[in-house]
Image (cartoon, rainbow, N blue to C red):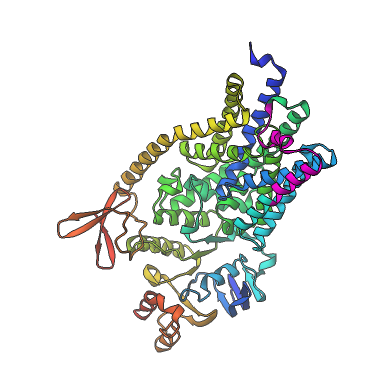
Amino acid sequence: MSVSPVLRAEAVGTWLGGSQILHGIDLAVQPGEVVALLGGNGSGKTTLLRTLLGLIPHQTGSVALFGVPLTHFHDWPRIGYVPQHARLQVPGATAREIVLLGRLSRRSLFRPASGEDRRAVDEALERVGMQAMGSRPMVQLSGGQQQRVLIARALVGRTDLLVLDEPLAALDLRTQTSLARLMAGLHEQGMTILTVLHELGAMEPLLTRGVVLRNGHIIHDGPLSAGPGLDDCLPSGEHPQLRVVGTGRDGLLSS
Amino acid sequence: MNIFTLDFMIRALVAGAFTGIMAPAVGTYIVQRRLGLLGDGLGHVAIAGVGLALLTGSQPVPIAIAVCVLGAIGIEWLRQSGRASGDVGLAILFYGGLSAGVLMAGIAGRGGGSLSQYLFGSLTSVNDGDVIAVGIVGVLVSAVAIGCCPQLFAVCADEDFARTQGLRTSAYNMAIVVLAAITVAVSMRTVGLMLVSALMVIPVATSQNMVSGFRRGLLVAMTIGLVEALSGIIISYHLDSASGATIVVLAILVFAATLPVSAWLQHRRRGLVEDSEEAGLFPRVGDHPPYHGHQPDHPAILHGDHVDYLHDGHRHAPHGDHFDEH
């Protein structure tokens, strides 16, 4: 392939609390792709996402972002990370303050926000349709609006890769659809997207590729409409810890 | 008689003012990290420092600062390395420091009486050296709390995201607890080790009742702390009461008085959110999960042939696998 991948993992193994969570993960994401990490609870999809960003150390293998090994990677404005919105702890903070956090990688200590920072925040809020809500405290926003603010925060750098952790979790269908539309727009503008999904939901039409994990192994990596082979690798009833993800499997099978 | 002509009152007011400013400054981050009781634990550790100073015959304030900072580094290291939960770590810090301090004070031949001026403060007996120490630490802590607000806020609010911004979050987390330790130890001559934690938490909670925005909340909390410390000292002079306790009781009364303000502001803001959504700025978005049953905290209302559930000021009703907004 002529273009170097945005993200490449080779033979990555991650241990947490003495047990191995990820086994020999090989994954490459090319520019312009929309890749979903799928799998049941405990399959390791969120651990993989956090490993790829260096939030969890990996013990074997290697990870590179934009061709640079993770340990030497400093070009963080190119990465926009969107954690699960339910885990945010910000009583009182306004949407604008949350988005401004996305400029931290280019701000030094004891330096107040510049006019450029503030303009970037305005632009990012506008891109997600939240320009009228900047001064609202986060606690007063609905789940979908909070998710939009977190996406704005991830866009406020000069982001090339958007990394999302279950962006549609705990949101109703209408909100899921409008967020998926937002991400479709970003993709059209050239954004590469890697997202953990518990179920395909409204994101399905957008995905160029699905990566299915089971017990820390990648068991499928390819188009979601891969045909008969795909059914065999999907989470099945004989794995008790995967049984709860019936919605995810149904979503895949209906594709 | 004018209290501002009394030297000891001037010293008390200046030292109290610095404490009133810096305690809520660092307290804003402590509260954000949900470590509201950390200050109390650090106060117990500082007692070990006071005991050590009494035992060795040295100055209590520098020794207490050193011991308190070491304790804070230890507890944060335990937390970051996952060796002890925050809870257990704090408890060990609490009782280890308290018992060691009382033990050493006893060996030095000084009982609980000599400790009590550090436990509850003794503003009217602060000397010039105390005022200078509180002043230097107060300026330093406030400058870091305001100047590094974006970085410290990021680490408190969303540590994972802060790391994807290239921040060394463990260093910032350590900085927060070290600032708290210095603040607690240096405040032992003003409001006292047992009460300084109250000034780190209550003005912050009061501020959050009144304003929104993290940075604005920080600045308002520092202002509230300053006004409460000065007012408390003046009131305590007229009532002839303990100044530290008077400041804290005043802070609690002010907090209680702002509760109705908080309720009114929330009511008003909620109204604004509803309006803008209805004006069609956004597709209406709800924060309820797609498949939930009846939640007992959402009152049910019979509506024709179905049941609506009250939710954030509007009604919704189950329809197949989702909820309709009514």
Q: Is residue B204 left or right of residue A141?
A: right
Q: In the picture, which quadrant includes the C terminus of chain B?
A: bottom left
Query: Residue B303 location in percent, x, y?
Result: 17, 55
Magenta includes B277?
no
Asked whether residue B167 is in view, the answer is no
Relative depth, front residue between A98 and A115: A98
Residue B53 figure quarter: top right
Asked whether residue A39 is in view, the answer is yes
The range drawn in magenta is B96-123
Relative depth, front residue between B120 and B1: B120
Relative depth, front residue between B93 and B154: B93
Q: How many marks?
A: 0
Picture layout, residue A252 above or below residue B184: below
Picture layout, residue A9 above or below residue B279: below
Q: Residue at x 35, y 42 (%)?
A: B272
Q: Is residue A129 left or right of residue B148?
A: left
Query: Residue B242 location in percent, x, y?
Result: 62, 28
Residue B201 figure quarter: top right
- Which residue lies most toward the top here? B1
Q: Residue at x 61, y 64 (%)?
A: A55
Query: Residue B62 location in percent, x, y?
Result: 78, 39
Residue B295 figure quarter: bottom left
